[in-house]
Image (cartoon, rainbow, N blue to C red):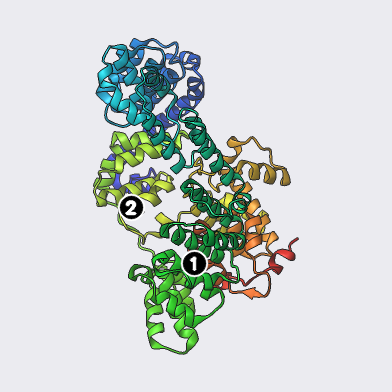
């Protein structure tokens, strides 16, 4: 480990150590000053304002120019001022920093700008050197415009048509190229028909309707019918209960039933049974639709689920059907059926932890068996959700051994000096986390596994826990629990978890599962920050606890995000009478969905309820959080918290008591 500047260190190692410590202190002071200068100037540079840089004195400017992120500051300003910036200045920057990511990003923006302003010669020169052959539609289309402008039309047609023949709307930069194809009568009726079919297959019905206008009214009508099937699937199906030989209508009916199934599998099943009697659907259409309805009948816990799944033809059976047959048997605690269902799975599926656990639980419920105990004992050696449950079943110790990976000083020092990792770290330190992650991932892509282990240790030392966790997992190393289950913001979690009347280890389990402790991350659904809150949820929770709310700024601030996330988690716990399984599921999928998933009568084992969560993502999420909570509890207290003790039974009263 690096030397620290203490009296003991200096006394033990003498003058050399003192000089190393002094050098480190001076470097730390310098880098802190550089980070401060960058933060003072970067936001303005992104707005196209360079005056904060110009206002620096000569010493400050020299310090900032020596900072590894000086190119990022310049690139931010040049991106913001592309329309008015001097092209020679941009090109000089790109030449100087050609290999750095900020230069690559600026080059892309600059190339688009050249195309948009009609400087096609300059555009084409950059395009040929950096982008040709990379299938970037916007740039490819501008290049085609350059070809047309240069009188090289013969080189355009085939490439232009391939860009046109897609089932979605292309980049707006392609519009002039497509206009050229139309003006020169280079698009035949067959081309329109082909793209119409591609749009239908991609479910881009508005595009299909627009294309239909260039074909005939019949195709406009076909696209309109698809839109009707999409918006009102039940009405569409009921209006087509009489025989038809029209293949488009048959495809639309299959699509309508598919969409209706998500809302009400029983109505979909009834209408589909009637439609099959009068229409000549293909064997494939019937198999796919029968399976879709049966699966959603099971996911929605409807009474006929097991019957519909078992009555599917052999050709419609797959692993997903086998899983839901087993989950339905499990929900009914029909252990004999469960054994049969698992035995009919593929070998790989049977070997998964989930089904090894439940197969042997079923065996043990039907009578004492040494084989079940042996299999569960082996599973209990895993540090996982099912490993913990198996250990609980046999009252065994958990596999919580913690092996700290050794530091290789030479490798660590070498990595710490690498310019690409230095840049990645500085991006993280100044709050440009996503850019830092991108550069980190590029930097480690070609490292050896040993180097990646040391890089993970380095990231952990820097407090960059998401990179430490992801990097060590990428090489299949899972035993350094301090590395994989870190405890950042510990006082913040402790304070706000206590205010929300929830245990901090649960909050940690949520945060790690949601974001790997990334403070700026955004999900595809729009959730933001360390505990992944939707903006609307953040606003509501902030109002309920009188926390000033500034949208994204509040959600990307770790302290306020943790306060909001723990408060919301506490609200979910209160809603479900303290049942952490239900509250965890609600945190991920929303409480109104969880309300619908509660048993209508009686109580259910939480383990069984978890297995029958309809959404794959939420089911995995709940298992991941509960296992992580167990590990965090052990890391924080040194005590084992039995997972089974945290899985309270599930019933409708869990909600009723809270409302």
Q: Position of residue 593 (x, y in %)?
A: 63, 57
Work out how far the residue at label 2 is from the one at label 1, CA to CA, in angstroms: 27 Å
Q: Examine the rendering and report whether any part of residue 395 can be seen.
A: no
**Relative to residue 501, is residue 537 depicted above or below?**
above
**Front: mark 2 or 1:** 2
Q: Is residue 448 above or below residue 293?
A: above
Which disc number belongs to residue 102?
none
Q: Position of residue 564 (x, y in %)?
A: 63, 47
Q: Is residue 408 left or right of residue 523?
A: left
Q: Nearer the viewer, residue 27 or 329?
A: 329
Question: From the image, which quarter does the C terminus lie in?
Answer: bottom right
- Which residue is label 1 attached to? 638
- Quadrant location of residue 198? top left
Describe residue 409's horizontal placement relative to residue 264 as left or right: left
With 262 as the anchor, is 401 left or right in this view?
left
Residue 178, image x, y percentages: 39, 22
At mark 1, the secondary structure is loop
For the residue pair 288 and 215, the one nearer the viewer reads as 215
Residue under label 2, please give it: 474
């Amino acid at each position: 480990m690096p030397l620290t500047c203490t009296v003991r260190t200096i006394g033990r190692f003498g003058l050399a150590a003192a000089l190393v410590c002094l050098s480190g202190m001076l470097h730390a002071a310098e880098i802190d000053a550089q980070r401060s200068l960058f933060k003072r100037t970067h936001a303005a540079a992104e707005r196209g304002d360079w005056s904060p840089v110009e206002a620096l004195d000569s010493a400050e400017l020299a310090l900032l120019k020596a900072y590894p992120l000086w190119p990022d500051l310049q690139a931010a300003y040049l991106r913001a001022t592309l329309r008015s910036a001097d092209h020679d200045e941009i090109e000089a920057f790109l030449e100087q920093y050609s290999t750095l990511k900020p230069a690559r990003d600026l080059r892309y923006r600059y190339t688009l700008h050249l195309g948009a302003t009609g400087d096609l010669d300059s555009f084409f020169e950059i395009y040929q050197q950096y982008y040709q052959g990379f299938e970037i539609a916007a740039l490819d289309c501008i290049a085609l415009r350059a070809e047309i402008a240069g009188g090289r039309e013969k080189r355009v047609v085939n490439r232009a048509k391939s860009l046109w023949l897609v089932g979605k709307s292309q980049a707006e930069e392609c519009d002039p190229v497509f206009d050229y194809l139309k003006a020169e009568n280079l698009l035949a009726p067959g081309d329109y028909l082909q793209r119409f079919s591609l749009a239908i297959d991609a479910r881009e019905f508005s595009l299909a309707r627009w294309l239909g206008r260039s074909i005939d009214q019949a195709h406009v009508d076909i696209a309109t019918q698809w839109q009707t099937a999409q918006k009102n699937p039940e009405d569409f199906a009921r209006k087509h209960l009489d025989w038809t030989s029209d293949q488009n209508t048959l495809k639309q009916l299959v699509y309508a039933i598919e969409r209706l199934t998500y809302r009400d599998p029983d109505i979909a099943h009834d209408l589909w049974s009637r439609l099959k009697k009068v229409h000549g659907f293909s064997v494939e259409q019937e198999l796919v639709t029968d399976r879709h309805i049966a699966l959603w009948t099971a996911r929605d816990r409807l009474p006929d689920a097991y019957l519909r799944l078992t009555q599917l033809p052999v050709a419609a059976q797959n692993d997903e059907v086998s899983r839901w047959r087993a989950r339905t048997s499990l929900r009914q605690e029909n252990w004999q059926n469960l054994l049969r269902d698992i035995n009919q799975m593929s070998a790989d599926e049977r070997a998964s932890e989930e089904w090894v656990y439940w197969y042997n639980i079923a065996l043990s419920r039907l009578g004492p068996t040494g084989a079940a105990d042996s299999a569960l004992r082996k599973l209990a050696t895993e540090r996982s959700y099912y490993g913990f449950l198996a250990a609980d079943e046999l009252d065994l110790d958990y596999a919580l051994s913690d092996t700290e990976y050794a530091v290789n000083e030479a490798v660590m020092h070498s990595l710490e000096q690498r310019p690409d990792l230095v840049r990645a770290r500085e991006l993280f330190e100044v709050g440009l986390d996503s850019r830092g992650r991108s550069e980190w991932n590029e930097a480690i892509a070609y490292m050896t596994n040993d180097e990646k282990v040391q890089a993970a240790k380095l990231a952990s030392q820097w407090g960059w826990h998401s990179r430490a966790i992801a990097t060590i997992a990428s090489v299949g190393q899972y035993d350094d629990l301090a590395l994989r289950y870190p405890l950042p913001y510990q006082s913040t979690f402790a304070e706000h978890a206590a205010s929300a009347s929830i245990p901090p280890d649960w909050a940690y389990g949520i945060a790690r599962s949601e974001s790997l402790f990334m403070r700026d991350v955004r999900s595809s659904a729009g959730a933001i920050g360390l505990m992944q809150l939707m903006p609307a949820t953040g606003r509501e929770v902030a109002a309920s606890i009188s926390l000033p709310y500034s949208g994204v700024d509040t959600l990307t601030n770790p302290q306020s995000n943790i306060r909001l996330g723990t408060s919301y988690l506490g609200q979910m716990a209160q809603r479900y009478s303290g049942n952490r399984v239900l509250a965890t599921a609600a945190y991920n999928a929303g409480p109104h969905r969880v309300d619908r998933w509660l048993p209508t009568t009686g109580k259910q084992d939480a383990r069984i309820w978890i297995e029958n969560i309809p959404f794959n993502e939420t089911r995995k999420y709940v298992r991941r959080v509960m296992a992580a909570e167990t590990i965090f509890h052990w890391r924080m207290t040194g005590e084992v918290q039995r997972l089974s003790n945290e899985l309270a039974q599930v019933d409708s009263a869990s909600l009723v008591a809270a409302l």
